[in-house]
Image (cartoon, coloured by chain):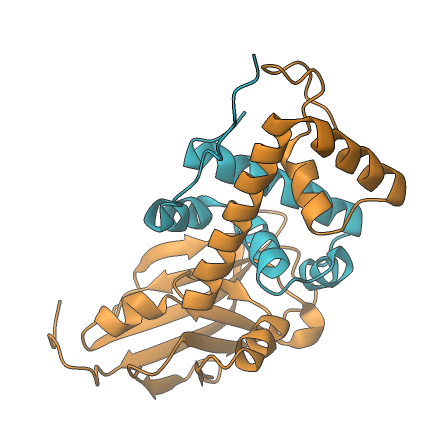
Amino acid sequence: MLMPVQPSIPNLDHQLLTRCVQKLKERERAVVVMTFYDEKTSADVANFLGVSEANTRVIRHRAIHQLRDCMGVAS
Amino acid sequence: MSTGNEGHCSNAIDAAVLADYWLSALSGADEEAVEQHLFECDLCGARLREVIALAEGVRKLARDGSLQMVVSDAFLKCAADEGLQVRQYAPPPGGSVQCTVTAEDDILIGRLAANLSGAKRVDLCLCDEHGVEQSRLPDIPVNPAAGSVLLQESITFAKAAPNNKMIARLVAIEESGDERLLGEYTFNHTRSLPGPGAW
């Protein structure tokens, strides 16, 4: 039987998220903030970091996994 | 894109791929595949909502100016376009600047001018008034062409801070592991908000 699935972060703990974001490496933090706040493309972020777009995507993926781990919602 | 069997979802989509989907960063075929899967999978739909919540949370932290991090000029432009009040100080290398923060400020920036060319890795050291390193941001993102590093200090911290002196030091890390000083910048913070004059 299928059960309705609720989001695991219905009320995001912003203090925990702050600590988790500060725990990221500098480049990872820059990537997630530029991506989610500035809504920058991978090309823009790659230019700022001085790395390739593919590398930017790898950094973004790693950062998202680490944030989810830190927030206790990793799958 | 799949991580294998998970609960009642036999082909769960990785959270980072869902973030790519939300950012419209997938190719047409991959986007279509994710969309088709989301139509049929509550679990991945819930995970997508988690990813969006996380992204919105990061966006709020950035907007609150509460992160200590290196930012870009594009970030400052975005903040200014949003109507945020950006306070920026730019002490010259080897120099100092008198600074403060007011209740109206949203973002606090130190612009550290330096010749960054040739530096493979740059660390930003934050030191106390005696120049003793208290913390370090290792391997910060730098754009040699920009000729400066923009350090965002947490506005929450700055608004709570009493009078104090902070020394920021940019160092290049050579392949040998040796450090080369790129610039040192002193911020003399005077508290202008009501509150304690010392820690």
Find the residue positioned furthest to the right: B29
Q: Position of residue A54 (x, y in %)?
A: 78, 45
Find the residue positioned furthest to the front: A1
- Which quadrant holds the C terminus of chain B? bottom left
Kindly identify the residue that appears in the image at 74 percent across and 55 percent down.
Answer: A42
Q: Which chain is orange?
A: B
Q: Position of residue A73 (x, y in %)?
A: 47, 31
Q: Which quadrant of the figure has residue B97? A: bottom left
Q: Nearer the viewer, residue A51 or A31?
A: A31
Q: Nearer the viewer, residue B142 or B92?
A: B142
Q: Which quadrant of the figure has residue B28? A: top right
Q: Nearer the viewer, residue B148 or A48?
A: A48
Q: Nearer the viewer, residue B2 or A45?
A: B2
Q: Locate residue A11 relative to residue A64 in the image: left or right.
A: left
Please tell me whether residue A9 is drawn above or below residue B115 in the rendered image: above
**Residue B124 appears anywhere in the view:** no
Q: Locate residue B186 relative to residue B147 in the image: left or right.
A: left
- Which quadrant holds the N terminus of chain B? top right
**Residue B61 appears anywhere in the view:** yes
Q: Which quadrant of the figure has residue A44? A: bottom right
Kindly identify the residue that appears in the image at 46 percent across and 33 percent down.
Answer: A8
Q: Position of residue B45 (x, y in %)?
A: 62, 34
Q: Position of residue B68 (x, y in %)?
A: 42, 61
Please tell me whether residue B57 is drawn above or below residue B8 in the rendered image: below
What's the colour of chain A in the image? cyan
Q: How many marks?
A: 0
Kindly identify the residue that appears in the image at 39 percent across and 51 percent down.
Answer: A18
Kindly identify the residue that appears in the image at 20 percent across and 82 percent down.
Answer: B193
